[in-house]
Every structure is written in structure tokens, then in C-alpha cells.
Amino acid sequence: MRVLVLNGPNLGRLGVREPGVYGTTTYAQLAERLVALGGELGLEVEVRQTDAEHELLGWLHEAADAAAPVVLNPAAWTHTSVAVRDACAMLTAPLVEVHLSNVHAREDFRRTSLVSPVATGVVAGLGTSGYELALRHLAQAAAPVTG
Ligand code: DQA
């Protein structure tokens, strides 16, 4: 099963970006780790990041057309973008919203997510392991139930 791991603005700067908040793992290390974990879980994981909203919208449309599950860290667009939320609402496979930081323990404006109401589930505050948990969930959710 193909899974898209999509990341919004400024996440390409992980590792150097406010390491006290977002950790020291670089985006390249995170992407590599998620692809490797996907291999272990039997998932074909594609990790992408963009600072251009229209590009993220295109990827979400692609996921909707392919009925592919999505792990999404919308970053700042979480709190601002009706367009990202509307694109998420078109998805038919599970959508897991991930935030590295605990957005509920930070500034007030980060407590509102336009995406959460249309997400299957949300992981926040667990750092990069939030992405790993999201992939483990998707693999488990897709696995046939055995008795
Ligand atoms: C973030 C939290 C957002 O509020 C912020 O704008 C980000 C990253 C996180 O992963 O904790 O860019 O989504």
C-alpha cells in the first residue's frame, strides 16, 4: 500500500529550525527513517515537503484520486488554510494529522486546527515518533483481521 507523508512550510528546515521546539533530526533523516520503517511495515512510503500551498493541494488531490492514505503535517497552514482543509475533506482513505510539537501547549493561535475536524486522527507533541506511530497505525488499519 502506498502512503503519502506530506509536510508543509518550513519543515524542510527541521534540524536547524528552532531545535528546542522541533528537535535536531533533519528533514532528510526523518524522510529516510520513514521510508525504511515503511519497508518494514510493508508500506510504500513517499515523503514530500513544500513551502508552496498549491503544491500541497496538488498532492492531496493526487492522494484523493489514488485513494491513498495520508500522513500530513500541514505546519502553519494547519491554523490558516481553508483550502488545505477542503482538499483533506476530499480524501477517502485515512488521514493522520501529525505535529512534532504539542500545539495545545503553545501560543493560542496554534490551538486551532482547520484540518483536525476532517482528519481520522491527530498525533501532536511526540516529535518525529509521531510520524512513525502514524505509519504503524495505517499499516495495522490496512491489515486483514485474522482470528
Ligand atoms: C507544527 C506546529 C505548527 O504550529 C507550526 O506552524 C509548524 C510545525 C509542528 O509540527 O509542531 O510549522 O505543525
Image (cartoon, rainbow, N blue to C red):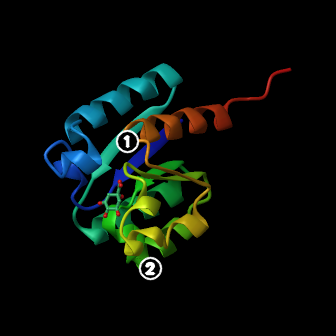
* Callout 2: CB less than 8 Å from ligand 1: no
Classify residue 97 as left or right of residue 127.
Answer: right
Q: In x, y percent, where is residue 42?
A: 52, 24
Q: Report the residue at 50% width, 75% height from top.
A: 86
Q: Report the residue at 47% width, 73% height from top.
A: 112
**Numbered circle sitting on residue 82:** 2
Quick check: 78 above or below 7?
below
Classify residue 144 as left or right of residue 35.
Answer: right
Q: In x, y percent, where is residue 146?
A: 81, 22
Q: Which residue is mark 1?
A: 127
Quadrant containing ligand 1: bottom left
Question: Which element carries disc 2, helix, strand or loop?
Answer: helix
Q: Report the residue at 58% width, 60% height from top.
A: 119
Q: Is residue 99 visible?
A: yes
Q: Marks 1/2: CA distance?
A: 25 Å
- Tell me the quadrant of the picture where the C terminus can be found: top right
